[in-house]
């Protein structure tokens, strides 16, 4: 009989482990499930933490969540010397979630013997790589670490050398497991070079004095370069809104063109800079970075036409601040960078910039462009040999699986809604048309072609100008015959209970399905019962949430009784509930979005004076920016009983993002930011989200539900719009009050406003007065939605 290599290895490993298991192991030893995080210790009452090496760290639900700052970032667990082999443990198990393709090193710290406390410590490494991007469980057998650890005298674990910094990682449920653990899979390999980043300082969050006194010897400190230094990303051009709406790079430091460029477009991890003239510039700051002995220079991909030239300036500040900035400038010619229209990697060593203090790097500044240029990922490279920052591949979305869930036949016969014979009305003689300008719509050949560059716009075709009862079609399908792009959503709109379009909100709600999931290249079939709306009072269908500018041509929209033979329908994905109004009778909610940090205090004072609970929808990235001061303000607001809720990480139009990976990036980072600021185990509920710009669509709803692991989160729109975006900076800022009065009088009861402008903030007391005068009770959004988990009304 032939045994393959892996089987032999497994067999040998099994025999070894069995031979080593001297004692019966009665139960796994939980080192840390983070229930004692706030006390500053792990389950064994020993220290854990990051010694401040992370940008952000918090713990909840069995895991610690952190964002590594640089390749000196680490997370450690210490414990009583464990005679792991003698006591029958076979491996170390933990859960981890990191960027897809990512890797990290696990340092197992051991000593000579558990009975000899004066022995010296040693670090042994294992690299865990090929992260899936999802939560995964890693089990490492007590074998295969380098540097021959004493598995019978282990005292600590350190997670470090994270392949990606500036993104969220989690580690959870750290356990020594009993019995035989299979040989390492290919995802585990031994590192040959090593370094030690030992836990030496005391975490500040600790309220309990950890039992450190029993630990007499600190692990060895080495000053050598970490074995797996990873290039430090300056910007991966991951998010247009992060750069041009909020003005940050991937280091969460300021980056901008200050409006000097003719255009600045972020797409597909590239930055397209089109200069207006030679005064156009672009900069990216580092926050006084110390690159000495670690990074040798900066590398980036560039594509520019032959003959393109510009200047590169590196600045440093002798005092780590805006003052005392010094700069050194080189032209592309001096750097010997020449362009030929293809994208290539370019770099410079810091030594090229004479006099540059690499311990206090402030920013890189590009100017004096004679033509446009496209930049790829820009990073500090490790050591003296230039290398490229490679963008980790994101997990591809799973293919749509379709089953044949045929709905029961409808009670009524199908009918044609729209055949595009008429520009102004559909086949039912009802209105069809676009929400507002911004969509290009052409008719011809009994078809209509739509294209738009705004994911916020929609085109409607109505069944009625009041309520239509579609219950007898619950088993039927919406069929759309089309060609071209399928990157849009289809919504079925629900009228308000009075079926009165003069009453707010109108429509009351709708559900959106993703065209691409339900269609082939020519036809879309959507079961009507996949739309979570009240079928007794529907208004009509809308095509909306276009996330491509490519046109779509539609030739028919109809309701049909049956599917074509063999047609398969995908499962309905959870899509949350889209709300515009309170459900609690006689309630009214102020829901205040992001704003300018300089007005935040004033808003808080006004709210305090009015003595009303409100909801704040916060943007994650500015919350993390210490210089904004927002974290403290929102923490105070929370402690005063206000609701804190999500409003994305960088404020993009969520449905307009090109792919689910970008949507997930926003949600994950946002959830991470809120957890970091309020503490992962705080009572901040994350199931309320206000879409930036109100941009809604099937994908952003489905991914919200998926990322929150909650089938029914609230997607909170509004029914009272102060129209600050329109009037706040106009000659007639008072019109914000008129808008408020108009919508409140029409029955609106959930507000949208920002604190971006002085005039809006100064009108807030007036808004509150008007709201109170309606006789309704002012409360938080969760309270006005009668959410059983909302705090009781007091
Ligand atoms: C940790 O373990 C607990 C209990 O088994 C489980 O409920 C939780 O989901 C786990 N968390 C992680 C992140 O593994
Ligand atoms: C403990 O370890 C130290 C340092 O390795 C060694 O000098 C000493 O002899 C050991 N003591 C015992 C009792 O093994
Ligand atoms: C892990 O990644 C490396 C390098 O990309 C690759 O060679 C290897 O096959 C991967 N291992 C697994 C188990 O996917
Ligand atoms: C989108 O289209 C509008 C009108 O068609 C135009 O004014 C605007 O510049 C376009 N925006 C972009 C980003 O292309
Ligand atoms: C649907 O709307 C009808 C008419 O307004 C109402 O009577 C019914 O209770 C609603 N159904 C649900 C489930 O809300
Ligand atoms: C805001 O407006 C108020 C009232 O008009 C004025 O007193 C105040 O100085 C303004 N504040 C700022 C920062 O412009």
Image (cartoon, rainbow, N blue to C red):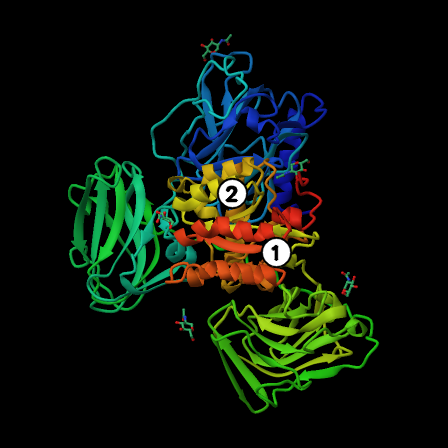
- Relative placement, left or right, of 255 versus 733 is left
The residue identified by callout 1 is 749
Q: Can residue 724 be seen in the rendering of this structure?
A: yes
Q: Could you say where residue 475 lies in the image, as x and y percent from the top left? A: 79, 72
- Furthest toward the bottom, the residue is 445
In the picture shown, does residue 559 fall above or below 318?
below
Q: Which residue is mark 2?
A: 607
Frontmost residue, 601 versus 733: 733
* Quarter containing the C terminus: top right
Q: Residue at x 62, y 23 (%)?
A: 85
Q: Is mark 1 within 8 Å of ligand 5?
A: no
Q: Position of residue 34 (x, y in %)?
A: 59, 31
Dot 1 and dot 2 residues touching (CB under 8 Å)? no
Q: Give 626 or 311, whichever is nearer the viewer.
A: 626
Q: Is residue 119 above or below residue 451?
A: above
| Vertical comparison of 62 with 484: above or below | above
Name the residue: 62% across, 46% down.
Answer: 779
- Decide which of 762, 327 is in the foreground and name it: 762
Q: Secondary structure at mark 2?
A: helix
Question: Could you say which quadrant of the image residue 268 lies in?
Answer: bottom left
In the shown orientation, is residue 303 left or right of residue 131?
left
């Amino acid at each position: 009989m032939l045994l393959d290599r892996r089987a032999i290895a497994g067999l040998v490993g099994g025999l070894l482990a069995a031979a080593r298991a001297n004692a019966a192991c009665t139960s796994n030893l939980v080192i840390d499930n983070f229930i004692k995080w706030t006390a500053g210790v792990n389950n064994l009452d020993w220290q854990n933490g990051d010694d401040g090496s992370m940008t952000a760290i918090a713990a909840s639900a069995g895991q610690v969540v952190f964002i590594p700052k640089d390749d000196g970032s680490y997370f450690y667990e210490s414990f009583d010397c464990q005679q792991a082999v003698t006591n029958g443990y076979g491996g170390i198990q933990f859960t981890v979630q990191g960027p897809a393709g990512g890797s990290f090193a696990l340092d197992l710290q051991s000593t000579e013997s558990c009975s000899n406390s004066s022995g010296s410590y040693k670090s042994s490494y294992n690299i865990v790589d090929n992260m899936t991007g999802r939560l995964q469980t890693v089990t490492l057998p007590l074998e295969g670490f380098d540097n021959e650890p004493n598995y019978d005298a282990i005292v600590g674990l350190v997670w470090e050398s994270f392949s990606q910094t500036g993104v969220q990682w989690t580690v959870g449920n750290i356990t020594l497991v009993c019995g035989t653990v299979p040989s390492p899979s290919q995802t585990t390999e031994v590192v040959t070079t090593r370094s030690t980043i030992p836990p030496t300082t005391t975490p500040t969050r600790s309220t309990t004095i950890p039992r450190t006194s029993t630990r007499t010897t600190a692990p060895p400190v080495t000053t050598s370069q970490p074995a797996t230094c990873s290039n430090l990303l300056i910007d991966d051009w991951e998010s247009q809104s992060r750069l041009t709406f909020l003005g940050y790079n991937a280091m969460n430091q300021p980056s901008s063109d200050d409006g000097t460029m003719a255009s600045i477009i972020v797409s597909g991890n590239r930055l397209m800079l089109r200069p207006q003239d030679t005064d156009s510039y672009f900069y990216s700051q580092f926050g006084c970075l110390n690159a000495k002995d670690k990074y040798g220079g900066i590398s980036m991909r560039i594509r520019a036409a032959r003959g393109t030239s510009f200047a590169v300036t590196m600045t440093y500040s002798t005092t780590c601040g805006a003052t005392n900035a010094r700069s050194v400038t080189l032209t592309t010619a001096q750097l010997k960078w020449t362009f030929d229209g293809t994208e290539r990697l370019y770099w410079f060593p810091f030594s090229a910039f004479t006099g540059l203090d690499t311990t206090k790097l402030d920013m890189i500044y590009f100017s004096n462009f004679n033509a446009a240029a496209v930049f790829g990922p820009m990073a500090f490279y490790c050591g003296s040999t230039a290398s490229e920052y490679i963008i980790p591949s994101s997990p591809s979305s799973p293919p749509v699986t379709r089953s044949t869930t045929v709905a029961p036949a409808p009670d009524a016969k199908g009918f044609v809604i729209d055949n595009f014979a008429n520009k102004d009305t559909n086949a039912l003689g009802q209105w069809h048309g676009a929400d507002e300008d911004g969509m290009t719509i052409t008719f011809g050949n009994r078809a209509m072609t739509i294209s738009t560059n705004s994911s916020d716009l929609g085109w409607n075709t109505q069944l009625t100008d009041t309520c239509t009862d579609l219950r007898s079609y619950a088993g039927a399908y919406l069929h759309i015959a089309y060609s071209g792009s399928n990157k849009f959503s289809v919504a079925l709109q629900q009228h308000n209970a009075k079926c009165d379009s003069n009453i707010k909100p109108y429509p009351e709600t709708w559900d959106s399905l993703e065209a691409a999931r339900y269609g082939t290249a020519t036809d879309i079939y959507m079961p009507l019962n996949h739309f979570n709306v009240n079928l007794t009072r529907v208004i009509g269908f809308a095509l909306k949430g276009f996330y491509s500018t490519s046109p779509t041509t539609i030739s028919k929209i109809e309701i049909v009784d049956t599917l074509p033979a063999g047609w398969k329908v995908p499962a309905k994905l959870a899509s949350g509930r889209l709300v515009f109004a309170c459900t609690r009778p006689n309630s009214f909610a102020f829901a205040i979005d992001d704003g300018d940090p300089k007005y935040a205090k004033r808003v808080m004072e006004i709210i305090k004076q009015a003595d009303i609970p409100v909801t704040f929808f916060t943007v994650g990235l500015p919350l993390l920016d210490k210089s904004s001061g927002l974290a403290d303000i929102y923490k105070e607001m929370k402690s005063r009983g206000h609701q804190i809720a999500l409003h994305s990480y960088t404020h993009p139009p969520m449905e307009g993002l090109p792919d689910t990976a970008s949507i997930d990036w926003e949600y994950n980072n946002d959830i991470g930011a809120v957890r970091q600021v309020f503490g992962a185990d705080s009572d901040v509920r994350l199931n309320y989200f206000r879409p930036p710009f109100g941009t809604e669509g099937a994908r952003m709803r489905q991914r919200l539900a998926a990322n929150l692991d909650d089938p029914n989160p609230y997607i909170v729109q509004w029914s009272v719009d102060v129209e600050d975006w329109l009037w706040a900076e106009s000659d007639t800022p008072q019109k914000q009050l008129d808008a408020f009065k108009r919508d409140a009088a029409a029955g609106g009861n959930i507000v949208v406003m920002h604190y971006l402008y002085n005039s809006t903030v100064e009108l807030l007391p007036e808004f509150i007065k008007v709201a109170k005068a309606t006789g309704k009770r002012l409360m938080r959004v969760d309270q006005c939605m009668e959410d059983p988990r909302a705090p009781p009304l007091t």
